[in-house]
Amino acid sequence: MVGKDSSVMVQLANIIAKKYNKKFDILYIDLEAQYSLTIQHIYELKQLSQVRDFYHIALPLALRNAVSILQPKWICWERASKNLWVRDLPKDSINISNCPFPWFKEGEEFEDFIIQFANWYQKKWGGRVACGVGIRTDESLNRFRTITFQTNKTTFKNKNWTTKISMGENYIEVFNFYPIYDWSTEDIWGAVSKLDLKYNQIYELMYKNGLNIHEQRLCQPYGDDQRNGLDQFKALEYETWEKVVNRVNGVNFGNIYCRTTALGNLKSSKPKFMTWKEYTIFLLESIGIYNSDLMLHYYRKIKKFAYWYKKRDNIDIPDIPDEANSKLENQKKVISWRRIARAIEKNDFYMKRLCFAQTKTDNEELKRLIHKWDNLLTKDTISDDKDLINFIENEVIEDDFKND
């Protein structure tokens, strides 16, 4: 993905390798929907003097898509979606047509591929392998704890900033090491300046577009954290935006709501100039832009929800309050437009937040949506929702098995 951390780490490695007359290899995972400036920087790194083999991987890997309930994962470089690819395959890449890895399966998880590659690489070259990882712990308390304090890991010469890799229950002769784990963002840019290192010019555009150096992210844009930068993707490289929207389900919704509660960012809320009723309608209409079936599904649920309160408490739709007591809303004891809006924001397909249970009708509707949208929910691409997982495994997969 080559963000600033990995880029600086690789260039520092090149400086040291040159000093000791050594060579090293680079693994780069190309996730297809990348900034063009990122690819330009990749080719700069390929020209480093001490690089021996540059493994430019452009294989169909399964990646997290946190902006869609219908496609919780997407597969980059998927052959069946070639007409929608954001970019052409890099000519010097390892792809599905020339893949040298006998263990690789199309749609393999990104994390599994990394481990499998490490094992393959170690067997190819033999001996002990050191794998540099360009991450910093000031971005994550869990990273800091794992690298500096975790005691139940195998390290190299008792260096806490190293970790031996395992495949299942067995260790392989590969150690991850984190040479810049204690660096700050300021350290990264300080090194770029003082050592005259090359860097991805996309960061310059991010800065000019209003992001400070601590807010800039460059991982695949549809993950749980990275989706917060989808609006930047649109602003910085508008020429590829249409391709990205067509490539991954829910991207435009993510672009619109990436910094709101609609994608789980609870520090922000609806626009101040809108009432919760207006915001509810706005959310429904926005969903309808890319998936009218899902919009109608939510509309029917809300209509039943309102009818139930009409029957029980004689509250007509015009009389539904914009807000109610927050505690009672959380306890699901009162009706309000805020409660309805927040159910939509959470992509709550079964609308459990409105006291609905998972029903046979819901499952039939979900099955219809799945097949209409090219089976985007499969055994390998189910979301984290327990009921959705059970439904997919017990119903859809069984139907597919019967059809086979």
Image (cartoon, rainbow, N blue to C red):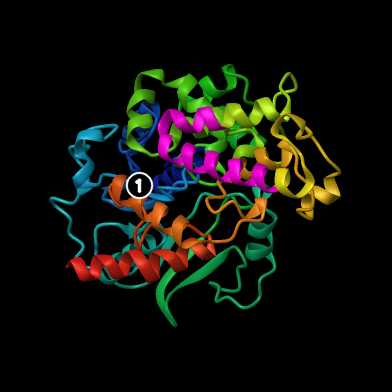
Residue ID at (50%, 40%): 8
Label 1 CA crowd tier, 10 Å (few <14, some 14–19, many 20+): some
- Picture coordinates of residue 130, whole percent (x, y): 43, 63
Residue ID at (70%, 55%): 141
Q: Nearer the viewer, residue 315 or 148?
A: 315
Looking at the rendered structure, the secondary structure element under dot 1 is strand
- Picture coordinates of residue 67, whole percent (x, y): 49, 41
Q: Report if residue 289 lies within the magenta region.
A: yes
Residue ID at (47%, 55%): 362
Q: Which residue is mark 1?
A: 28
Q: Nearer the viewer, residue 247 or 102?
A: 247
Q: Give the residues drawn in magenta, as a range.
A: 284-308
Q: Residue furthest bottom?
A: 169
Residue 22 in view in this figure: no
- Picture coordinates of residue 109, whole percent (x, y): 37, 59
Q: Report if residue 241 lies within the magenta region.
A: no
Split into 4 quadrants, where in the image is the N terminus? top left
Residue ID at (73%, 35%): 316
Q: Quadrant of residue 127?
A: bottom left
Split into 4 quadrants, where in the image is the C terminus? bottom left
Q: Quadrant of residue 301?
A: top right
Q: Amino acid at mark 1?
A: Tyr
